[in-house]
Amino acid sequence: MIGLFGGAFDPPHSGHVALVEAAKRELGLDRVVVIVAADPGHKRVDTPADVRLALTRAAFPDDEVVLDDHARTVDMLRAHPEWHGATFLIGADELVNFPSWKEPGEVLKLVRLGVATRPGHAAQLSDSERMASFELEQPAASRDVRAMIEAGEDVRELMPPPVWDLIERDGLYLRQPSYTESA
């Protein structure tokens, strides 16, 4: 059985990796395709797609990682019939937003959802035939990781080492001083 895990991955962190590993284990997935949204329709990203793709490949060295140009999940799924019937992995926080996705009913016709929940907090699955849940400790969100890096905090424990190495090497996510700041 194949799983799909999409996102901006700005940056990918250990929580993303833990989600994929838990989904493989709990949902019996044989493999997962990690899909980096080049231009996600639901959020703004400042980090170029090729950089996020490289970081994501570093985070998931044993999984297939692809770049996708579709801003919406349903459009991506329509463009990839080979993925129909897969399990699309999301967090329980995203399940709350699922009704606002473009054509959520069509998404559920093309794939089933694998919903990561916090221990002791079951997801409200409205369609148990098209949705399955699995438990996962909830780590920091990518936006929190970016803010921590910008603030100069040590986030190495939140990142797969190869991802941190690339971030550190390339100076990614560091706050860029504005022209009005004194030197």
Image (tube, rainbow, N blue to C red):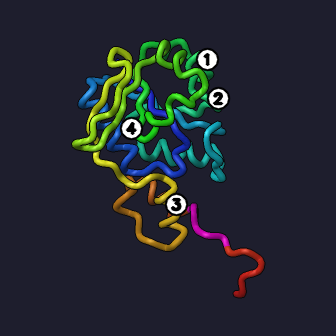
Q: State the extent of the magenta-drawn residues as a range.
A: 170-176
Residue of label 4: 92
Q: Nearer the observer, disc 4 or disc 2?
A: 4
Q: Residues within 10 Å of mark 4 (few under 14, many from 20)?
A: many
Q: Position of residue 26 (x, y in %)?
A: 24, 30
Residue of label 2: 70
Q: Label 2 amino acid?
A: His
Q: Earlier in the sequence, mark 1 or mark 3?
A: 1
Label 1, label 3: how far apart the Cα atoms are: 31 Å
Q: Position of residue 23 (x, y in %)?
A: 31, 32
Q: Secondary structure at mark 4?
A: helix
Label 1, label 4: how far apart the Cα atoms are: 26 Å
Q: Earlier in the sequence, mark 2 or mark 3?
A: 2
Give the residue drawn at x 66%, y 39%. 39
Q: Residues within 10 Å of mark 2 (few under 14, many from 20)?
A: some
Magenta stretch: helix, strand or loop mostly: loop
Q: Nearer the observer, disc 3 or disc 4?
A: 4
Q: Position of residue 2 (x, y in %)?
A: 38, 21
Q: Are marks 3 and 4 in contact (CB under 8 Å)?
A: no
Q: Label 4 amino acid?
A: Ala
Label 3, label 4: how far apart the Cα atoms are: 21 Å
Q: Is residue 92 magenta?
A: no
In the image, is residue 157 above or below residue 69? Answer: below
Residue of label 1: 79
Q: Earlier in the sequence, mark 4 or mark 2?
A: 2
Residue of label 3: 146
Q: Label 1 amino acid?
A: Ala
Label 4, label 2: how far apart the Cα atoms are: 23 Å
Q: Are marks 1 and 2 in contact (CB under 8 Å)?
A: yes
Please state which of residues 175 and 170 is positioned toward the viewer in this rendering.
175
Q: Label 3 amino acid?
A: Arg
